[in-house]
Amino acid sequence: MKKTMVDVIFMSEKRKNTLLLLQDGPKEMEYLLNSLDTTRTALLPQIKVLEDHYLVSHKKDIYQLTTVGRLIVNDMSPLINTIEVLDMDIDYWESHDLEFIPHSFLERIDELRSCKVLSPTIAELFEINKDFVKSASKSSHIYLLTTIMHPEFPSLLSEFIKDNRKVTMIVTRELYARFTQELYDSFKGFIAHGGVRFFIYQGDLRVTTLSITDSCFILRLLSKNKDFSYKQLLCNDPRSYQWSRDLFDHYLGGSIPITEV
């Protein structure tokens, strides 16, 4: 009696990972053995199961997905990646407010599988993340979306301007009002500088910050009960970077530029 496809794929790590390795094209047995860190004796029975269920075929020592195998793996891969993202820290995803992330971006959450959740120490609670500052110092353009007025923002923006780095920043109406009241001269100077662009988002921003450099981003979501959370999501690979830029552009599309105060 044949196994169900779910059992074939998910009841064996070797079978599952073999399918994922073959997604990019035919592979030699030696490549599969090295990638899976296993022996031929251990792997061959699992590949036989895949062949018996018409997911994999081979010629001599070259293995590849069948048409059915490609169809299944192309749909399977995003699911596995999504599970990996959630497994990274399921407590984080369950305890934080995800309404800031539109549904279309939640469907792409598998792109965040290289990310990690950071929990700052008490001494670091009110500091801007050091990884972000280091990455920003090497970036040509920094993108910031924020609902809070961090005390280091003026000095940080001044440093970016000094180093000829472009900055695009989205704020709420409430934060804009605070900038004009409490940091009027600095804010006016930033707006007058061609390298810094400010925007006001027209809706409700249910997030703390989204900070993006050329190579990484940090997202600070609110907790599920809408309270401030110190935990940070740090991501630094090309796929997750594109996800963050697309998310920023989504909110930029609902914002209006600030050209004067």
Image (spheres, rainbow, N blue to C red):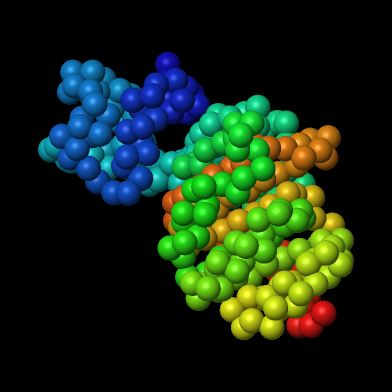
Q: Left or right of 86: which side holds 238? A: left
How many marks the image carries: the answer is 0
Q: Position of residue 197 (x, y in %)?
A: 67, 76
Is residue 126 visible in the rendered structure shown here? yes
Q: Say which residue appears at 52% left-offset and 47% top-offset.
A: 130
The x and y percentages for residue 243 are 56, 56
Residue drawn at point x = 56 percent, y = 47 percent = 129
Rendering quarter of residue 177: bottom right
Task: State whether residue 250 is above or below residue 62.
Answer: below
Instruction: Check the image and name the residue furthest to the left.
Output: 60
Quadrant occupied by the C terminus: bottom right
Q: Is residue 243 above or below residue 39?
A: below
Res 100 visible: no
Q: Is residue 88 left or right of residue 190?
A: left
Residue 260 sits above or below residue 75 on the image: below
Spot occupied by residue 11 in the image (x, y as percentages of width and height): 44, 20
The residue drawn where x is 61% and y is 56% is 211
Query: Is residue 136 placed above or below 223 in the rendered structure?
Result: below
Q: Camera-side residue: 240 or 232?
A: 232
Quick one: 187 or 212, which is closer to the camera? Answer: 187
Drawn side of residue 11 relative to residue 145, left or right: left
Image quadrant holding the N terminus, namely top left
The percent position of residue 255, horizontal first and vertical second, equals 77, 71
Of 128 and 117, the residue lying toward us: 128
Could you say which quadrant of the image residue 41 lies in?
A: top left
